[in-house]
């Protein structure tokens, strides 16, 4: 069952705060350990090596979240254009049939299965790094180091722009 603290985290909205100094020190391994099982949209476990030499976008979402639906559509469209360069890994607060149905509509995304231990760990880490709700996403470069939204746009420019 979802804890009160987690529920407050999930419903409070996605905000960047003055804790951005802490974000510079974020690493992908702060959120997903090397032994964390990752699954493709059809539910098959994929090796962590699948993500070698790719940027990662961790996407925190839930099916009960209205703004998440809008953000998911934007991320999905962007990922279709740049799927060879980065991967989306969903950290959803849904489980079972809801998660299966959600992922079936995102065939090129990956996910980490919901479990309460992971929720508590991510809740703690998110608060420490100034992330306070869903939908939110955190970008990591090919070495697993955090990079901000502006850096992300430089890596994956819009049509007609040059990649920096």
Image: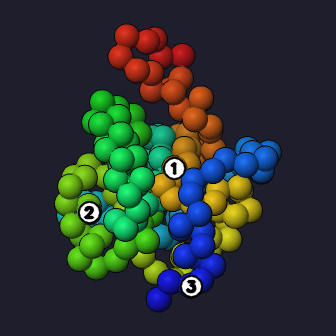
Side of 110 relative to 137 (left or right): left
Where does label 3 land, which residue?
3
Q: CA distance from mark 2 to mark 3?
A: 22 Å
Compared to residue 59, the image places residue 117 above or below, namely below
Note whether 122 is above or below 22 in the view shown.
Answer: below
Q: Assign a secondary structure to mark 1.
A: strand
Q: Nearer the viewer, residue 73 or 147?
A: 73
- The answer, for residue 131, to whether it is visible in the render is yes
What residue do we see at 63% from left, 60% from top? 132
**Residue designated by label 2:** 102
Extreme bottom residue here?
1
Quadrant of residue 4 in the image? bottom right
Instruction: Give the residue pinned by disc 1.
Output: 137
Provide residue 94's location: percent of width, then percent of height.
37, 73
Determine whether, in the image, residue 52 is placed left or right of residue 124.
Answer: left
What residue appears at the point 36 percent right and 47 percent down from the top-left corner? Answer: 70
- Ranked by sequence position, the earlier of labels 3 and 1 is 3
Near-viewer residue (42 or 120): 120
């Amino acid at each position: 069952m979802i804890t009160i603290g987690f529920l407050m985290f999930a419903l409070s909205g996605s905000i960047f705060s003055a804790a951005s100094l802490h974000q510079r020190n974020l690493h992908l391994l702060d959120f997903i350990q090397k032994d964390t099982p990752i699954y493709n949209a059809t539910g098959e476990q994929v090796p962590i090596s699948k993500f070698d030499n790719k940027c990662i976008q961790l996407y925190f979402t839930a099916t009960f979240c209205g703004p998440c639906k809008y953000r998911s559509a934007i991320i999905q469209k962007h990922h279709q254009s740049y799927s060879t360069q980065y991967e989306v890994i969903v950290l959803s607060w849904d489980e079972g049939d809801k998660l299966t149905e959600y992922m079936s509509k995102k065939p090129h995304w990956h996910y980490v299965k919901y479990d309460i231990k992971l929720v508590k760990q991510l809740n703690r880490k998110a608060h420490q790094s100034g992330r306070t709700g869903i939908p939110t996403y955190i970008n990591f470069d090919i070495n697993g180091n955090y990079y901000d939204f502006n850096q992300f746009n430089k890596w994956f420019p819009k049509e007609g722009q040059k990649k920096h």
